[in-house]
Amino acid sequence: MLNIVWPIFIIISFIYAIFTGNIDNINNSIFESTESAVNLSITLLGTMCLWNGIMEIASRTSVIDKLTNFLKPLIKFLFPSLKNDIDIQKQISMNMIANILGLGNAATPLGIKAMKSMQKQNKDKEKLTNSMAMFIVINTASLQIIPTTVIAIRNSLGSNNPTKIIFPVWIATIIAATVGILVTKLFIKLDK
């Protein structure tokens, strides 16, 4: 759908610019926005590389095992059907840690890996398990202690205080995660 909507907006913008005599403004904005997009991409790429590297190093040490043990009571509460599968618990832990650190781009491949592992154990391949549904909710409404991507974007756009967003992000993500978990647990209970 968006591949139809965006070209329509672009065509309308060009036609409007031609009729109002603003072609110079469009040319200037194209080059300015291209430069901004490249600068933003480089900033985000650097941030992603740093945190992906840290997560890779952590995965090769005992840090992930310690964090998995720390998160084990929470994982057992959220995913009771996975209490005996340590590999999936570790994958979920790594995904949750990446999300908590605000590393959505690092969390995505970890989440896909965890979801594939849960799908292998799924008896009905056409239907989500309760654990898979809970994982999607947690992944979507994850608590973020350090919203790294948002801070990087605010910094690249010249914000005077790019970290000012941290406290509102804590409030929003705590509320979203709590409501998401409670509603999912309720639907799981009603489904039985």
Image: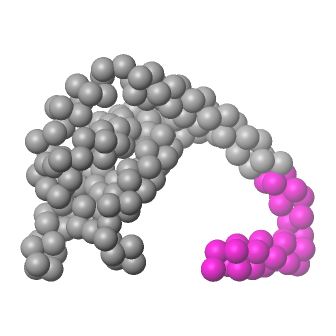
Q: Is residue 20 magenta?
A: yes
Location of the N terminus by quadrant is bottom right
- Name the spot of residue 140 as percent of width and height, x first: 35, 57
**For the image shown, how many numbered marks are present on the structure?**
0
Picture quadrant of residue 130: bottom left
Q: Is residue 96 magenta?
A: no
Picture quadrant of residue 148: top left
Q: Residue at x 36, y 19 (%)?
A: 61
Region rendered in magenta? 1-30
Please state if 51 lies on the left or on the right of 30 as rendered: left
- Name the spot of residue 23 as percent of width and height, x first: 89, 64
Please state if 62 lies on the left or on the right of 23 as rendered: left
Q: Nearer the viewer, residue 9 or 90?
A: 90
Establish if 11 lies above or below 159.
below
Q: Residue at x 11, y 42 (%)?
A: 73
Location of the C terminus by quadrant is bottom left
Q: Residue at x 76, y 74 (%)?
A: 7
